[in-house]
Amino acid sequence: AGCEIVRVAVPDETSARSIADIKKKTGIPIIADIHFDHRLAIIAAESGVDGLRINPGNIGSMDKVRNVADCARHHGIPIRIGVNAGSLDSDLTGKHGGATPDAMVESALRQIDMLESSGFMDIKVSLKASDVPRTVSAYRKLASKTDIPLHLGVTEAGGLFPGLVKSS
């Protein structure tokens, strides 16, 4: 009640296909959160999802990213690149000495380039860490390098109380 948008996890094909049934029961835009399997993004798009949240860095090859971008373009849906400090590529954490704001920004720019080189421009980006100062620093750094819209937020995978406090 009162929601204006809902993001749903899509860990498997059954979940991706269920979006069509969910859409029949609500007028709320549905965003599909996709990890690792580009085919789930395509199925979700074909099932009527209103947007995708992906991490192109874990979707796979450039061909797979291009397939997702082509499908999203065909269905007129945006893609949010979701960079999480806890799941950065090891080459970036090694180069930057951990999950730093610079590592997060480099990950985002790499992922933006993957989509834009596929001719896909309907992009927004989130950069999330479990602490506010690192998150704010990453957003400020990225904002100085691109004018792509930013999806603001903090992420916390801890228990109920710590997660609630940090996310609030």
Image (tube, rainbow, N blue to C red):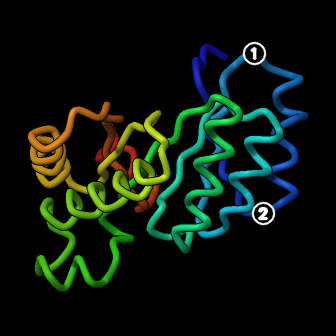
Q: Quadrant of the C terminus?
A: top left
Task: Point out which mark residue 71 bears.
Answer: none
In the drawing, does residue 121 fall left or right of residue 72? left
- Image position, residue 129 (x, y; %): 27, 56
The residue under label 1 is which amino acid type? Gly
Quadrant location of residue 101? bottom left
In the drawing, does residue 36 fall left or right of residue 44? left
> Which residue is more in the foreground, 54 or 22?
54
Task: Point out which mark residue 27 bears.
Answer: 1
Distance, label 1 to label 2, CA atoms, is 23 Å
- Image position, residue 81 (x, y; %): 43, 49
> Which residue is more in the foreground, 123 or 62?
62
- Image position, residue 84 (x, y; %): 36, 60
Pointers 1 and 2 in contact (CB under 8 A)?
no
Q: Quadrant of the N terminus?
A: top right
Residue drawn at point x = 58 percent, y = 18 percent? 4
Please tell me whether residue 51 is drawn above or below residue 24 in the rendered image. Answer: below
Residue drawn at point x = 34 percent, y = 77 percent? 89
In the drawing, does residue 105 fall left or right of residue 118? left
- Helix, strand or loop under label 1: loop
The residue under label 2 is which amino acid type? Asp
Mark 1 closeness class: few <14, some 14–19, many ≥20 residues within 10 Å? few
Residue drawn at point x = 58 percent, y = 48 percent? 69
Residue drawn at point x = 48 percent, y = 45 percent? 119
Quadrant location of residue 57? bottom left
Q: Which residue is mark 2?
A: 12
- Helix, strand or loop under label 2: loop
Please tell me whether residue 138 is drawn above or below residue 88 in the rendered image. Answer: above
Mark 2 closeness class: few <14, some 14–19, many ≥20 residues within 10 Å? few
